[in-house]
Image (spheres, rainbow, N blue to C red):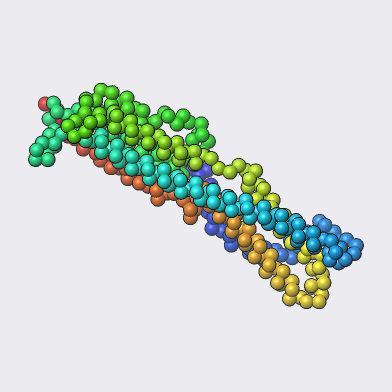
Amino acid sequence: KDTKRFYRDLVSSLIFYVLPFLGPAFAFSQWKTILGLVHSVIGDEAKLLELTQVTLTPATNGVVVASCAIALGTLTSVTVSSLRQRQLVVRSCLNKEACEIAMLTSAINAMLGPPLNQAGVKKTKSSEWNPVMHLQALQLLREYCARVLVESSLLADASKLQEQCISETELMGILDAFRASEGMRAYTVCTLRDEATVRIAKLNDARSERLAYISTGFPFFHWVILALLAGSIALCFLIEVDQSEGRFLQERPGDSIRLRIVFTLMGGAFSGLAALCADLNDPFRGSFNINSSTQQFARMVQVLGVEIDQIRSTKKRCRP
């Protein structure tokens, strides 16, 4: 798995950061080779100049290129905006989950932790505190934070996320553990289970939305259509240039350099769009990623681990 992930990261880095420069460089350096290949495939045609001026150029520029360009521009715009919106929604869901987990942790510590005396000091007598339920609730909450961290990082597997049962999490274990909790405390009218149910319901809503956006993307056929549209525009350009390339080389050699530059610009635009779409399509790699929003759950796991260790040490001191 580590080797597979290494090669996937390597390929992703090449697409994100090398392809925008490699595409135009290849187009500029291989211009004559590509044009010669197109000419060898299409072949010569009688009365080419007359056909170009009367029929082929108007039909290509007025109908084919225009149709492909409109379709490519529309699909690219929809793709980029949808992928960017997906990342924003996933970030929003992660932030909501982090806030709800913090509120749930505070409620658990307030209702299951050692009560405070009038001086604000915690009472840690075993008769006034149930550390077993407190410890169990925090352990389950830490496991849930670790689950969110795995689901929203490079460790996530989209196929497994789609196959898993969304409702089977540690949150249901927390609700089951609160069945034996006592009634409400003096500062609230809600029991711990009622408070936890409200928070867990919000967590389930945010998690369901987050997993839906992460596991749902564009199908492979969508990317094939984009590639075919871009290739069609490039092919139309090469066909039109091939019709007059010999005249340009004989009469005005500088025009061949101009055509090479134009083809390079077109190749760079298509390569840049491909790298941008690939970057946005992977929410955990590249320049557009959500890793900064996910790291807060790693800190939550560490903080909950410290609290659990403190409860265990306090529990040992309270033993008769």
Residue appearing at x 48%, y 53% in the figure: 288
Residue 113 placement: quadrant: top left
Residue appearing at x 66%, y 47% in the figure: 224
Residue 286 in the image, given as x and y percentages of width and height: 49, 53
Q: Is residue 280 left or right of residue 54?
A: left
Q: Is residue 153 left or right of residue 105?
A: right
Residue 166 in view of the camera: yes
Which one is nearer the viewer's eye here, 125 or 27?
Answer: 125
Q: Residue furthest left?
A: 119
Is 86 placed above or below 20 here?
Answer: above
Residue 194 in the image, given as x and y percentages of width and height: 29, 29
Q: Residue furthest front?
A: 189
Label tally: 0
Q: Is residue 20 left or right of residue 124?
A: right
Residue 246 in the image, given as x and y percentages of width and height: 82, 70
Residue 107 in the image, given as x and y percentages of width and height: 25, 36
Residue appearing at x 79%, y 62% in the figure: 58
Which one is nearer the viewer's eye here, 92 or 14?
Answer: 92
Q: Residue furthest top?
A: 180
Q: Is residue 290 left or right of residue 77?
A: left
Residue 36 in view of the camera: no
The C terminus - image quarter: top left
Residue 24 placement: quadrant: bottom right
Is 278 placed above or below 314 here?
Answer: below
Residue appearing at x 49%, y 38% in the figure: 212
